[in-house]
Image (spheres, rainbow, N blue to C red):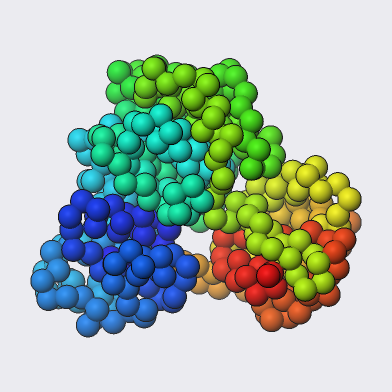
């Protein structure tokens, strides 16, 4: 598995090992996920090299971030080893199982984790592949014994269409992945196709009256369950109104799969749900007593909602954000929205853009974002290295709440400054 340290790839690796396969992989760098795989007995080579591919390899699975000129993929082509993308492989392993796919622009990971936790608490023994390490399981993979397969499904590059779910959860729809979807209509078309693929005996769990969702449901044959009408649940370990909505979606999906699951059992499972890695995760305190949290928010809406929830939970704290923009295309498309969201913090620092799968774009930078945020009245500055950001954050005192934020590796700063 090339790019095995990716959050989806690593979960699939654990699933394949659990089902009796001999699995190894490579990734470009060491990470908490890579270390977790090694501890679970899955060999991982750091760095990409043709020699990483064992001679007896029967299948090479590659992450989206791995291009066709990768030396390991080149070796597979040269020796006739079949290749599959992550989502092709996920579609293959989910075939023949009762698949519950959780998709949507925001809240996929938390909703998938909650759903898996509910089903596990109710002794339904699900298998789950989740887009982050869930604290309740200590992993992004839950090994089950039933035919229930819970999986987080991303809309990017139509990946969700590789799956054939019996139950499809759509948390919400908002424009994202602008390197692939030119506009909201194109994104809605993908969700529309996904919804229409759910069979007549299946269920779509969503907010059917939402203005971005209603148009995609016009020709579906499956039963529609509106999770916004399914009661409310307390999730004491998580912040924000959005997590209460995620809880409603997870509860509705669990009851769609198993009508015998009671409201009381769901309430207990959600009350005990601890959350996931990098979702407003408490990391400790700095030597000067500032609280340190880390969050995966990388879309303007997620940033805004996280900051609003943090303000509600810590009304007397100065909120300082270290934000790591993810992708040049996303940063450019949502420049003003990012600027406005960051201006909600008392102070924000913008790190250099995390390129991920993209080539640098000279028209956009962390300085562009900071300049735009200042035009919205924000106290925002750009810094060009993690070392500089770390040293600046260490100046904060016990009256401050620090949040490292973004889909890149900004979490490393939280690890460095928090005890």
Eyeballing the image, is 54 above or below 18?
Answer: below
Q: Position of residue 364 (x, y in %)?
A: 66, 68
Please indicate whether residue 367 sits to the left or right of residue 200 in the image. right
Q: For the C terminus, give its image quadrant.
A: bottom right
Q: Position of residue 267 (x, y in %)?
A: 55, 27
Eyeballing the image, is 303 above or below 174?
Answer: below
Q: How many marks?
A: 0
Residue at the image position 37 percent from the left and 24 percent from the top: 257
Q: Position of residue 36 (x, y in %)?
A: 41, 65
Q: Position of residue 284 (x, y in %)?
A: 69, 63
* Residue 40 visible in rendering: yes
Eyeballing the image, is 365 above or below 341?
Answer: below
Q: For the N terminus, give its image quadrant.
A: bottom left
Which of 417/76 is in front? Answer: 417
Which of 343/175 is in front? Answer: 343
Residue at the image position 42 percent from the left and 38 percent from the top: 116
Residue at the image position 76 percent from the left and 79 percent from the top: 391
Please indicate whether residue 365 sits to the left or right of residue 57 in the image. right
Please indicate whether residue 73 sits to the left or right of residue 297 in the image. left
Q: Quadrant of residue 11?
A: bottom left
* Residue 219 visible in rendering: no
Residue at the image position 86 percent from the left and 68 percent from the top: 397
């Amino acid at each position: 598995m090339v790019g095995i340290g990716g959050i989806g790839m690593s979960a699939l690796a654990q699933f394949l090992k659990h089902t009796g396969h001999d699995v190894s992989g490579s990734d470009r760098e060491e990470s908490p996920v890579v270390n977790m795989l090694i501890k679970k007995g899955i060999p991982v080579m750091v760095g990409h090299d043709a020699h990483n591919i064992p001679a007896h390899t029967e299948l090479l699975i590659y992450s989206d971030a791995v291009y066709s000129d990768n030396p390991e993929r080149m070796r597979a082509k040269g020796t006739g080893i079949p290749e599959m993308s992550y989502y092709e492989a996920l579609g293959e392993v989910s075939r023949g199982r009762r698949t519950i796919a959780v998709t949507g622009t925001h809240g996929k990971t938390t909703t998938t984790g909650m759903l898996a936790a509910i089903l596990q608490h109710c002794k339904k023994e699900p298998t789950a592949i989740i887009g982050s390490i869930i604290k309740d399981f200590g992993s992004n993979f839950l090994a089950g014994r039933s035919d229930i397969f819970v999986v987080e499904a991303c809309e990017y590059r139509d990946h969700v269409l590789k799956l054939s779910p019996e139950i499809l959860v759509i948390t919400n729809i908002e424009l994202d992945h602008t390197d692939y979807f030119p506009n909201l209509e194109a994104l809605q078309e993908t969700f529309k196709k996904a919804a229409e693929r759910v069979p007549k005996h299946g269920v779509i769990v969503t907010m059917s009256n939402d203005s971005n969702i209603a148009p995609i449901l016009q020709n579906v044959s499956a039963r529609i369950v509106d999770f916004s009408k399914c009661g409310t649940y307390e999730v004491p370990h998580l912040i924000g109104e959005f997590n209460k909505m995620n809880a409603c979606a997870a509860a509705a999906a669990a009851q769609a799969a198993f009508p015998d699951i009671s409201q009381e059992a769901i309430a207990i499972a959600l009350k005990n749900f601890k959350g996931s890695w990098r979702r407003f995760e408490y990391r400790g305190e700095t030597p000067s007593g500032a609280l340190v949290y880390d969050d995966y928010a990388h879309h303007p809406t997620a940033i805004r909602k996280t900051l609003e929830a943090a303000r509600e939970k810590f009304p007397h704290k100065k909120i300082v954000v270290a934000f790591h923009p993810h992708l040049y295309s996303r940063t450019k498309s949502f420049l003003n929205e990012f600027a406005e969201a960051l201006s909600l913090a008392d102070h924000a620092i913008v790190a250099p853009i995390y390129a991920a799968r993209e080539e640098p774009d000279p028209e956009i930078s962390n300085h562009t974002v900071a300049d735009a945020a200042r035009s919205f009245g924000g106290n925002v500055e750009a810094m060009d290295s993690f070392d500089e950001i770390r040293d600046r954050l260490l100046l904060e005192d016990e009256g401050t709440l620090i949040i490292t934020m973004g889909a890149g590796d900004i979490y490393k700063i939280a690890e460095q400054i928090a005890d």
